[in-house]
């Protein structure tokens, strides 16, 4: 039960406006704020920021 509370599944949505998402887990103790990762968006064909979507 603790697994879902500490490391929830989050969606990372592209800031390029393409609607592309990545799904990952995050550690809520280490990163209590919203996650921002720079990843590849295949629709925009470039690396963009992906923000956590709840």
Image (cartoon, rainbow, N blue to C red):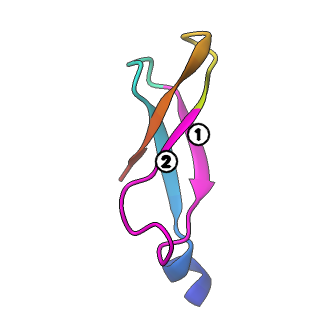
39 lies left or right of 28: right
In terms of secondary structure, where does tag 1 sit?
Answer: strand
- Residue 27 part of the magenta segment: yes
Q: Position of residue 41 (x, y in %)?
A: 59, 21
- Residue 1 shows in this picture: no
Lower position in the chain sequence, tag 2 or tag 1: 2
Q: Of residues 33 and 9, which is closer to you in this image?
A: 33
Q: Secondary structure at mark 2?
A: strand
Label 1 neighbourhood size at 10 Å, few (<14), some (14-19), many (20+)? some
Q: Which residue is mark 2?
A: 11
Percent x, y for residue 34?
37, 55
Report the residue marked by disc 1. 22
The residue that appears at 39% across and 69% down in the rendered structure is 32
Magenta segment: 20-38
In the rendered image, the quadrant that contains the N terminus is bottom right
Q: Which residue is depicted at the point 62% across and 10% down?
A: 45
Q: Nearer the viewer, residue 20 or 28?
A: 28
Q: Position of 49 compared to 43: left or right?
A: left
Q: Is residue 24 magenta?
A: yes
């Amino acid at each position: 039960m603790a697994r879902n509370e500490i490391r929830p599944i989050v969606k990372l949505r592209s800031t390029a406006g393409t609607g592309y998402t990545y799904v990952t887990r995050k550690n809520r103790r280490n990163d209590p704020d919203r996650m921002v990762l720079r990843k590849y968006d295949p629709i925009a064909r470039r690396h963009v920021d992906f923000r956590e979507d709840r």
